[in-house]
Image (cartoon, rainbow, N blue to C red):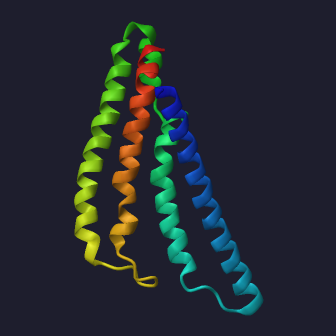
Amino acid sequence: MLRTLEAALVAVNRWLLILMMSAMACIVFANVVLRYTTGDSLIWAEEVARHLMIWTTFVGAGLVLRFGGHVAIDSLHQAVGSKAPWLRVVVVSGIACFCALMAWYSIDYVIVSRFQTTPVTGIPFSYVYVALPVGFALVLVHLALVGARYVRD
């Protein structure tokens, strides 16, 4: 059951990223084509593409963590090797604490920005910035699902 939920989470996360990246690419491509063929551009394209990039970054962070794609400095781990299995526990705990704190404090950031609106589209900035707590929560979920395997292996 847990494996099924985990597979569903990964699949939904992947497809969400694919859709957001595709939308961003289409918007930017259409804007460039319009600019060079007609001399006019979509006034909202740059802003929407930027917001999609923010969402893509935070929604994708957990998936990247799951597959080991983040930049890591592992020289200490390589130096101590298997003599310090507790080191992986410290790494997972540190990541979990950092993400939990960032998710908590980013909620305050979303609340503070709820009355500010974006210049072109006029949507509240909180709609854009809610990507932070969502992204950090997703990192925590992915970490919970792969953390035990990371520590064990």
Task: Tell me if residue 138 can be seen.
Answer: yes
Instruction: Report x, y in % for residue 25.
Output: 65, 66
Tell me the quarter of the picture where residue 40 sits.
Answer: bottom right
Point 69% across, 77% down: residue:
30
Point 30% across, 28% down: residue:
93
Tell me the quarter of the picture where residue 44 sits.
Answer: bottom right
Q: Residue furthest bottom?
A: 39
In depth, the one of 77 and 12 nearer the eye is 12
Q: Residue furthest right?
A: 37
Task: Tell me if residue 70 can be seen.
Answer: no
Q: Residue furthest front?
A: 1
Instruction: Report x, y in % for residue 78.
Output: 47, 18
Tell me the quarter of the picture where residue 147 sits.
Answer: top left
Instruction: Report x, y in % for residue 31.
Output: 66, 79
Point 41% across, 84% down: residue:
119
Seen in the picture, residue 8 relative to 46 is either above or below; the reply is above
- In this rendering, the count of numbered labels is 0
Seen in the picture, residue 129 relative to 149 is either above or below; the reply is below
Instruction: Report x, y in % for residue 115.
Output: 26, 77
Seen in the picture, residue 22 relative to 69 is either above or below; the reply is below
Point 44% across, 36% down: residue:
142
In depth, the one of 121 and 2 nearer the eye is 2
